[in-house]
Image (cartoon, rainbow, N blue to C red):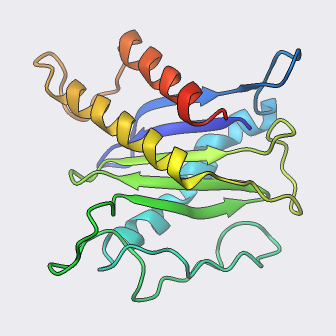
């Protein structure tokens, strides 16, 4: 299934964007349709309010999601006292940066990861039929692989921050960073 990945800055500005396509058998790479390629940044940015709400909850869980919304806009998402990002002082779970599936839009799923510095790593997951929107097909996400991908990309991002020539908040244009993110996507997401 194709994915659209972005790192979003503190002012909701894109720091890095990439689209990953899949290869099925002897077919060439299958990506998003042209219409979805143009809509992906809007779909991704529409989920940022939900992510901002989740990060201020005390215990990480987003099981309050109601997937029965016929419109597919994700507006039926409700946040209870059990969802979120910030960890309780007594919690032993340190894996609370990965929020999992936070939103959906006509058969596309949106997952998120938040760094402790407030950077948002967000991904739109398409369907296996080239990402074409469909209200009756659900995208299956491997949480462990997705979490590993986010953690590895976060590590790459931290290494980029340590570069004395990179100013925090500027777009990442490094071809090395891009190639490493794409290799991580092949490793973790295209199974």
The residue positioned 30% from the left and 74% from the top of the image is 56
Relative height, residue 16 to residue 71 (above, below): above
Of 155 and 15, the residue lying toward us: 155
For the N terminus, the quadrant is: top right
Which quadrant of the figure contains the C terminus?
top right
Is residue 136 shown left or right of residue 5? right
Which of the 4 image quadrants contains residue 82?
A: bottom left
Relative depth, front residue between 19 and 168: 19
Q: Position of residue 174 (x, y in %)?
A: 35, 14
Q: Position of residue 6 (x, y in %)?
A: 48, 38
Residue 66, image quadrant: bottom right
Residue 67: percent from left, percent from top: 72, 75
* Image spot of residue 28 (x, y percent): 83, 15
The outermost residue toward the left is 164
Q: Residue furthest top?
A: 175
Give above or below for 3 relative to 134: above
Q: Nearer the viewer, residue 156 or 191?
A: 191
């Amino acid at each position: 299934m194709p994915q659209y990945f972005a790192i979003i800055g503190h002012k909701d500005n894109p720091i890095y964007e990439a689209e990953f396509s899949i290869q099925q058998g002897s077919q060439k790479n299958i990506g998003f349709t042209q219409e979805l390629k143009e809509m992906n940044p809007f779909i991704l940015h529409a989920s940022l309010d939900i992510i901002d709400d989740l990060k201020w909850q005390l215990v990480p869980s987003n099981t309050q999601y109601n997937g029965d919304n016929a419109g597919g806009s994700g507006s039926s998402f409700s946040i209870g006292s059990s969802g979120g990002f910030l960890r309780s002082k007594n919690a032993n779970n340190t894996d609370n940066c990965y929020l999992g599936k936070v939103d959906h839009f006509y058969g596309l799923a949106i997952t998120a990861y938040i760094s402790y510095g407030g950077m948002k790593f967000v991904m739109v997951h398409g369907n296996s039929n080239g990402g074409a929107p469909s209200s009756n097909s659900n995208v299956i996400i491997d949480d462990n692989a997705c979490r590993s991908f986010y953690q590895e990309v976060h590590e790459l991002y931290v290494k980029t921050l340590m570069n004395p020539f990179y100013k925090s908040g500027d777009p990442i244009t490094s071809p090395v960073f891009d190639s490493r993110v794409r290799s991580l996507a092949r490793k973790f997401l295209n199974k």
